[in-house]
Image (tube, grey):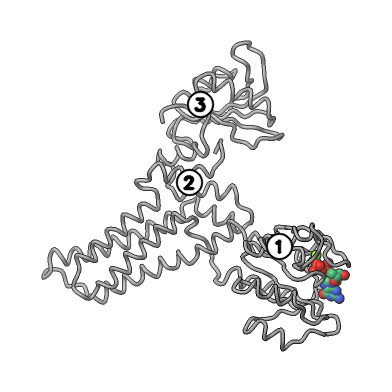
Amino acid sequence: MKDTIAAISTPRGFGGIGIIRMSGKEAKVIAEKVFSRNLEEPGRAYAGIVFDPNTREKIDTCVGIYYKAPHSYTGEDVVELQMHGGIKNLEVVLGTLLNLGSRLAERGEFTRRAFLNGKMDLLEASAVIELIEAKTDRALKIASKRLFGEASGKIDSLKEKVLNLLSVIEGSIDFPFDVENVEEEEILKRLEEIREEIQLMLSSYRIVRKIRDGVNVVIAGKPNVGKSTLLNTLLRFERAIVSETPGTTRDTVEEVIDFYGFPVKLIDTAGVRESPDKIEALGMERTLKAIEESDLVLFVFDAAETLSSEDIYLAHLTEGRERIIVLNKMDLPYLVDREELENLFKGEEIIETSALKKQGIEELERMMLEHISPVYIEDGFIADEREKGILTQILGHIEAAISISGKGGDELIAEELKEVISKLGVISGEGATEDILDEIFLRFCIGK
Ligand SMILES: Nc1nc2c(ncn2[C@@H]2O[C@H](COP(=O)(O)OP(=O)(O)O)[C@@H](O)[C@H]2O)c(=O)[nH]1
Ligand SMILES: [Mg+2]
């Protein structure tokens, strides 16, 4: 890991500025071979020129900054060359730097080095990618808090609590008659507190995931019930094609909205029905797939029509999925058999709307939010499967300790608590193997 890495750290495209970053022992020496200024003083911005070292031909103007180890992003010597944000100029200069003895950075390697050099723990390092990919304000807030160590702090304070408890228990093992015997009840109470804290972290996971990765909401229903109109109403602007001929939405139409901080992808589907039209058959296939991959289905009916076999087919198709029943066109004379409808959806709430007149939409949105986020969380804590997995194991150890407590097995409780402490360390990245690091950092792209 002693080699010097280089990469273009800004997105590939045309922009005002483009930055090449280098990290490693040789960063400064190599940079100075293509840059017209000496980067003597760390942290200072030097305005100069980048040139081809063989021909001395000037390539671009450039601001060079040298960050001396350990005061840099990676904890190593780092140089940033800030040029114009073109594709070719950056590629040419990068190519030159690679020829001069650096090598192209792997995905996430800058941040990986930052972790390995102790600039951040694994929770903070993985927050970098979350911050970059945040799609809503709320997702950003969660990523920022993690980046600035809030998750790490929670892990530390949990660790401290477990350590305290452990020392109390070990004290009573070592000096059973000495210490004013800690009540068994007190130990149990503390274990239960710790358990509750972990459970809370775990239960926030599903919601954090939705905030980060988004939620698929599929609008399903037979043709002409008002799906596209409903989509447009939810989007609050016209986007999907609205047509009076049944079956014109041939493809799925997708639009992402910021729904109370959740990136919600609204998917308007072609109506499911039997049709000789091949294109529509394709649309149907997509509809079925969309329903399968949905987090929530808005199942739309026409209040101004009686229930048809297509409605019933779809009702069965979406059974067991998270869904909201939407009875649309409530502004028209009511024809649907309410009793039949309620029989079809025993116990499920039916929301009445007029997508056209924009009635009942707030109620629908309130229901959507209840489905997407059954509990409100202030901020996220665990953000990926790895963390969730370890935390679940930790919960297992605490539960084991709870079941032992009161039965005189203090040594056994102590063993469980030691496991908890070591696993809390694993969450922050202690003893992380290459495989684990690969899993985290290969999600990044080159230059981060
Ligand atoms: N009166 C009334 N008409 C509606 C309502 N929602 C949709 N429509 C009309 O029903 C027709 C079909 O709507 P559309 O959204 O294309 O249905 P889709 O096939 O399910 O996507 C259009 O003429 C819409 O204007 C509603 O709530 N009330
Ligand atoms: Mg449509």
How many residues crowd mark 2 within 10 Å: few (<14), some (14–19), many (20+)? some
Residue 253 x, y percent position in the rendering: 75, 58
Could you tell me the amino acid type at mark 1? Thr
Q: Residue at x 72, y 34 (%)?
A: 14
* Residue 215 against residue 59 in the figure, above or below: below
Q: In terms of secondary structure, where does tag 2 sit?
A: helix
**Residue type indicated by callout 3:** Arg
Height in image: 93 above or below 252?
above
Residue 69 at x, y percent in the picture: 44, 31
Using residue 205 as the reference point, say whether residue 135 is left or right of it.
Answer: right
Name the residue carrying label 3: 103
Residue type at numbered disc 2:
Ile
**Could you say whether the residue bearing mark 3 is in a helix, strand or loop?**
strand
* Disc nearer the start of the sequence (1/3): 3
Q: Is residue 64 left or right of residue 150?
A: right
Please state, as top left, top right, bottom left or bottom right, where the C terminus lies in the image. Answer: top right
Q: Quadrant of residue 410?
A: bottom left
Q: Pointer 1: residues within 10 angstroms few (<14), some, or many (20+)?
A: many
Secondary structure under badge 1?
Answer: helix
Rendered location of residue 163, percent (x, y): 28, 60
| Circle on res. 287 | 1
